[in-house]
Image (cartoon, rainbow, N blue to C red):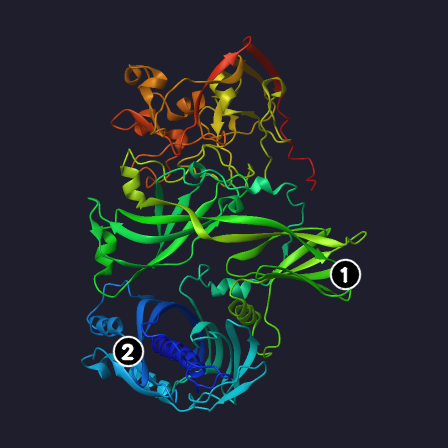
Amino acid sequence: MTLILQGAKLTVYRILFIFCCALAVQACSDRPKHLTFQPEDGEQRRYQMFSETYIEASNSFGSSSERIYSHMIMDYDVTEQAASFDVLMRPRFMMVRFRNGNFSSLDTPDYRQKKIWPFLEAGVSTVIDKKSGEVTDFIVHHEIEDADDSGFDPIRQLLQDELSRPGYSNGIALKLGATQQMPAVELLPEITLTVESLDDQQVGLSLQGENDEVKLYGVIQLERSTGLLTRSAVVMDMPLQHEFAEGRVRVVAAVMPDDWKSGFDLDFIYSADYQMPADIGALPDDLTALDMPSSAEVFPGRSGSIQSNGDKITLEYNHGVFDMFQLGHIEVDNLQAHDQAGNPIELDWHSVGALSFAFSETKAVQTHTDIYPLGWQDVVPKLEQIAFIEARLQRFAMTHNIVRLPVKDSETSVQFGEARAVLTPTEQPDVYHLRLEQAKNVFFSTRITGPDSGSVEHMKAANVPDWLEDGNRRLMAIVTSGYFPLSHTLYFEGERPNELQLLAHRIEDQSLEEKQIRFYNPDVALSTVELEPLTSVYLFPEEDNVTDFALTGPVFELKELHDLAPQDFERPQLYMVLSHEQAALCSLEQTADIKEAGRRIVWLPHEPRQRFMRRDSQLPLEVVYQLATEDGVRNFFYDHTAVVRLQCAGQPEWQLFDLDLGEQNWLVPVSALLGENWQEAFADMQLIELLRLFRFLDTQQKALSLVPPPGFASQPGVKLADIRLLDFVTEEGMLRIAGRVNRVEKLEASGDRIVREWVHQFPALPSSQVAYQD
């Protein structure tokens, strides 16, 4: 516990150190050739702050380690006075995770947290003198009773000491390579600030310092016109400050804009030391294939889903488009939570930029947006009341251009708006490095035409101290560029082309259209029959299937009726593999009078082990039967001769079933499928029987599954194949289809009746006298 508290204290120290770095380069003299702190009165900024603190400690009792991860959303409000700037800093959301627990602004506060919550909600202010740039005052807007007992007064003192220390009034010249020294304070070494990049909009700085105990390196991006922070990252390695233990502490921290959509999975950044195959292929000959689809395809429904992920909420919406470049760009805003009765719930939200993507080429594009509830009072009770969240989705058009990049023996580059592609030759004549630099609304896709092959890896910052780990270097590259930069290595095996072809995209400034979407709590959606499906669930798994024995056995394959035959896979076993259509129209028998230990040998269903299948809502692609004793105990045999007979009503053929579903095309009346007296005639019908007789297709001609009744998924071991039809029918006599239905088809038998028969001889029982052969 002591170690954890020490780590938590260091985390606070780290966050404050970031503030110091930001203010140190903001508050400067008013010379025009130097960076100046010139925010407007009423300026409001919000930042996301991520950190990870890793602690290693040892003493006479042994060694231990702790990893503390934190994410915070912080508001900065600037008020201009006659001679100063007042900067109010308020944490609006905070989450800290460590081995033995979590700390979050969403916690129901205990008696100590009830004292601290008002302090955090009120925030603290620093007063910065306009002329000198020095912090002249530190204002606490809510005093904490018994602050020493709560352990909070030392934190406030640390804030006050660090932010008011001298050295902030010296400006740094706006010139590449210009430096400024920040004097050493306590454990911190003297720090050198260096101008690394400079343009009309941004100033990029590095900060570096090292002494016998502490090593520090970071990068900072600032607005040139105001001196306000854009983003930053700092890594600090220092000794553990504890009187009874020795060890080291490494703090990694990043401050990003409020709309940073990618989060910071620091574990991923550390472990991303691998190469991926480059997307080498031909670009479309006709870019009209990427033209914007219709509004009905972009926004096919009025509903989305709410997914809870720890201390954040993710809003998910499924489009009817299968190419994210066709979709364009989506933004989500104007969030309003409602309770079950539709009454608004007063909650303040922070949403990051929306991400639109498809899991594969065969799946529709989804838009995901992470949102965070802000505040410190009564947040949890309000979250528990949410039935749905209403939001505005805006669609922005995206234009596409093919850009040609010359391939030469020297470095070449091409500009598309503010995006740039740079191709650099290596010492190997047929190997090049490609760097794609993106801007806010202009970027290149990763598909490249020209090379024969290639690889992609996450870029690492160059010209940094050797003590930084590769993960730290990747973080510096991300913060410096403002996105996840990738480096392509391209290989030319034959004659080298004169140019590469790249696909560039531009997001337009004005929105094309917008739509109000309601995102529902999954439990609410499940219990609301008239609510359209939140996502499409297909009846069969889409990914490549693997069926096996003991995870390594034979693959079951579907065949036409005239090609069917029992299979033994060179084992003393026998299988028959049918499609669901064949299983619906055919009967399978073992007609020989053979028994094992007095029990008849018959065909029994065998469920193949298949990956990527949701057993509560999907069926295996194949219907597999296996010869076994009638009690299922034994399924391998010797010396028997089996006779297999397959009888089918005809060839399976799907035909259109005339059914007008209307606007609510996800609701299908069972009486329309089976007749008005279906409850008597089909009282014992298994659901799988109906799903083999009828299929419900979406616009992609894929068979949709059904929406299970409430509580179905929570029943252990329950599979879709084991359920009665009645268990899935609503009180109104409806089947809820897990997607929008475009067409209903019914299975019919065509042609003559088919009868086939096979004789199978099982192998002789191996003799115990035969030597074992590997």
Disc 2 to disc 1, C-alpha distance: 57 Å
- Which residue does the image show at 41% across and 85% down from the upper left? 241
Residue at which label 1 appears: 408
* Number of marks in the rendered image: 2
Task: Tell me the mark number nearer the camera, choosing from 2 and 1.
Answer: 1
Image coordinates of residue 88 in percent, x first then y, are 30, 76
Query: SS class of the residue under badge 2?
Result: strand
**Near-viewer residue (715 or 263):** 263
Q: Which residue is the site of mark 2?
A: 124
Mark 2 is surrounded, within 10 Å at the Cα level, by few (under 14), some (14 to 19) or many (20 or more) other residues, namely some
Looking at numbered disc 1 in the image, what kind of residue is underneath it? Lys
Residue 365 image offset from top left, x and y in percent = 48, 44
Which image quadrant is residue 288 in? top right
Name the side, left or right, on which 404 lies relative to 90.
Answer: right
* Precedes in sequence: disc 2 or disc 1: 2
Asked which secondary structure carries label 1, the reply is: loop
Question: As shown in the figure, which amino acid type bears the numbered disc 2?
Answer: Val
Q: Quadrant of the C terminus?
A: top right
